[in-house]
Amino acid sequence: MFEKATSWMKEHEKTSLFFLVVIFLVIRVPGLSEPLHQDEYKWPIIANPINQTSDLQIPHPPLSEFIYRTAGELVGFNIHFRLVPLLFGTLSLVLFYYVLKKRFGKQVGYVGALLFTLSYFSILASLMVDTDGAVMPFFFLCMLLAYDTWRTAQTKKNMWLGLAVVFAILGLFIKVSFVLAIGAVVADFLWEKRKLLKTQDIIRYGGYGVGFIVGFIVLLILSQKLFPFFSLSGSVTYWEHFATGSRNWFQTFIQLVKAILYASPFLCLIPLFTPRHKLKELVPFLSYLIFGFIFYIILFDFSLGALDRYLQFIIIPLCALTAVAIVSVLGEPSATKADRNHIFSGTILSLLVLCVCFLSQSVPSLYPKSAWVSRVFSLHWNFLYVFSGGSGPFPFYVSFLFMALIWIVSLVLVVGAFFLPEWRKKTLLILIPLGLVYNAVFAEEYLFGLINGSAPHLLAGAVEFIKNNPDVKKVVVYNDNGGYEIQQIGKYEKRLYTSPEFDINEKVIGLNTYKDFYFELNIPRIDPASVYRRYLDSCPIVYNQTDHYISAIVYDCRKAPKISVSIQ
């Protein structure tokens, strides 16, 4: 079955790749208009040369800001900034195909590229204004492809090795964490040479490594002359704050789980079917995952950062592992009636699980987090879970019950097939439609919000109201939802965060000080027992629009009574 499905693609490689690119773009183009959320909107502000005197800066090596600054010069600093990650994501799709093709053949290349195209986490990464999800993977794949070509080349070997080194340096000039990608390629080299290594070889390679590090540091120092907007001291100060011993392990766990939910059970569980004899060619991908886990979860404290964004690097390794597993399981026998029956069964099961998304749902507030955590452990799963973050995405809801059911079904089937290999093919055929539905629901809610409500749609109407209302001079924006859009119309006062990590007494002083209009795009919901909810409820509503479970509300708090913590 699988061979028949890919036989035409094998014969028409360029045409097949072209269609994959078209599908990749068609899925993502609607997301180009997604509002820039929180840290995302710092990029067009900082990259704009007009704001060079601003205290804001990109705390990373200079190539990141140079890329976005160049993009701003080409398409403007106020619009279309998502074109940058989309461009790098599209290039990564093509590179990923050729990397997999070189290591495993065309079949795996096509499957891996298709997974990369349809995965929600990949969709998010290729639209998020930053460097972790699209830009760094591009340089990783460039480096890996150059390295793989060097491994097998009969001529011009020095050229390909030189290119691999150049891409390694360029990756480090994007972000220092690119050292993980370099480590993954080095691990592959050392694994391949493990039986041939002698002491003098280890010393020599160690010398090369030291020379590379010294060369990079020298280039980084010199780059301050070429890129005057780059501050090496500012970057060092920024890197230092991740090396703390008092991290918030609960927050780290929550963000790790969020990244796993984004990746889907399909990409996280199917790699268990990977044959052991294929693992040697998967060393760079496995090493990348292992090094990344050690770096982001164990060694350094990223609990206060956008850890779910940093973990976007897992998309490439997981898609590679899953593609190899799928081809290994499905690529041998031809189609049978039983195969079609298994796919049909998986489709029916997927549609049944999909139905729970349309049930009436509870909407707990994000804080206190213990409220929805207790729902999880008490099996009261019929509620909406909010997905958002400091660097996006713009908030959207997905049914927790829907996610839980697909994860449980997938886990049970994969564990059963792991111990009973003869079940693997039928299990995989059932899981394919489940995986498609899971990722499709995430993508649909992120891009359109047809099931639970569209925050971007509500924001557009609210911004238009605020812009055209002469009484509204300044607006305090809850959770900074739409902060950038309101800044663009010149009516942004400040943002209001309700996290319990902030000093509640200072927050109350702020509420009593800024007797202004407040804009609440209420995703996530504010704790109904909080002082914030009490304060906003004391203000008249001048604008209110609702889409399913999300509302956009503008409050006139100019005459709001003073509020205190004591009666909270």
Image: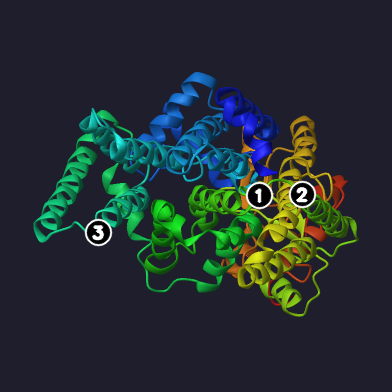
Local crowd size for mark 2, using a 10 Å CA cut-off: few (<14), some (14–19), many (≥20)? few
The residue under label 1 is 333
In which image quadrant can residue 79 be found? top right
How far apart are the two marked residues, 2 and 3, measured between alpha carbons? 43 Å
Helix, strand or loop at mark 2: loop
Say what amino acid the circle numbered 2 marks.
Thr
Q: Quadrant of residue 266?
A: bottom right
Q: Which mark is residue 336?
A: 2
- Answer yes or no: is residue 34 visible: no
Q: Is residue 479 left or right of residue 230?
A: right
Q: Quadrant of the C terminus?
A: bottom right
Give the residue drawn at x 77%, y 40%: 448
Q: Residue 194's mark?
A: 3
- How far apart marks 1 and 3 lie (CA) works out to 36 Å
Is disc 1 placed on a helix, strand or loop?
loop
Residue found 47% across the figure and 21% down from its top: 73
Q: Indicate the position of residue 245 as horizontal and vertical percent values.
A: 38, 73
Q: Are marks 1 and 2 in contact (CB under 8 Å)?
A: yes
- Report whether 190 appears left or right of 479: left
Q: Amino acid at mark 1?
A: Pro
